[in-house]
Amino acid sequence: MHEVINCFKENNPVINKKLRKVSVDEGLSIAKDLFNVLAKRKDGIGLAANQIGIDAAVAVVNVREPLILINPTIKEQWDEIEYYEGCLSFPGKSVSTKRFKNVIVQTDQEESGWYFSGVESSTEGKGTWEKENVKDQELRLLESVCVQHEIDHLNGVSCIDKAVDTTIRIEKKPGRNEPCFCGSGKKYKKCCINK
């Protein structure tokens, strides 16, 4: 049985490679292996073929229900957000990334043209495959981000590659007797923000 390759400890020659397209039948077979790995580990919600060393454009997502993505491409995306995410291939490391609340994904399966949305549940925000009464916005957003994360893997991009710096920096801290940067006109040492 396959296992997720820890990229901090082992070489994974396909983790940064755009993966080859596969037939739907081959994709379904690989997806079964991917779901088995997730079930055995019990600590992931998505997995791409290259994370277990297979050169195939196949990924699975299991947030609200199991989904298989064979040769997926993102056709549209909108409403950019910042999201804090981790990856099974880089255990113990989480990063902030830029993702999108809404994505439309095309795959080679018949039921393609999926709409993933992290907006509040409504007719407009409902995925095309969804059953009625699915209202958990956080899970919807998590699913949308997970799909984007796995499709990135299939294109040789990890969340580590997409990390954004969220540190707030002040260019120069004023000296004690200089005017405070808040605009109060007071000296920095006596300003209300230092009390």
Image (cartoon, helix red, strand yellow):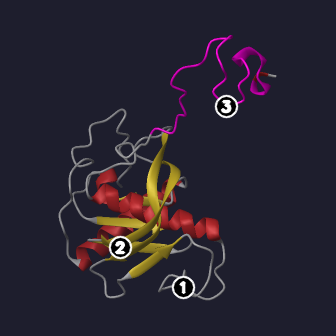
Percent position (x, y) of residue 137? 63, 70
Residue wearing tag 1: 124
Give, as a three-letter code, the residue at label 3. Answer: Gly
Q: Residues within 10 Å of mark 2 (few under 14, many from 20)?
A: few
Q: Which mark is residue 55?
A: none
The alpha-carbon separation of the residues under discs 2 and 3 comes to: 43 Å
User: Which residue in the protein does label 3 denote?
Assistant: 183
Mark 2 secondary-structure assignment: strand
Observer-nearest of 147 and 89: 147
| Amino acid at the residue labelled 2 | Glu
Residue count near mark 1 (Cα–Cα under 10 Å), binned few <14, some 14–19, many ≥20: few
Q: Position of residue 61 (x, y in %)?
A: 45, 66
Q: Is residue 83 above or below residue 103?
A: above
Asked whether, in this view, residue 99 is left or right of residue 51, the answer is right
Relative placement, left or right, of 84 versus 21 is right
Residues marked 3 and 1 touching at CB (< 8 Å):
no
Question: Which dot, 2 or 3, sits closer to the camera?
Answer: 3
Locate residue 17, reporting x and y percent: 21, 51
Of callouts 2 and 3, the N-terminal one: 2
In the figure, 117 relative to 100: above or below?
below
Q: Which mark is residue 76?
A: 2
Q: Residue at x 44, y 74 (%)?
A: 67
Q: Residue at x 17, y 63 (%)?
A: 20
Which of the marked residues, 3 or 1, is nearer the chain's N terminus? Answer: 1
Disc 1 residue type (three-letter): Glu
- Secondary structure, mark 3, is loop
Q: Would you identify the image quadrant in which residue 24 lies?
A: bottom left
CA distance separating discs 3 and 1: 45 Å
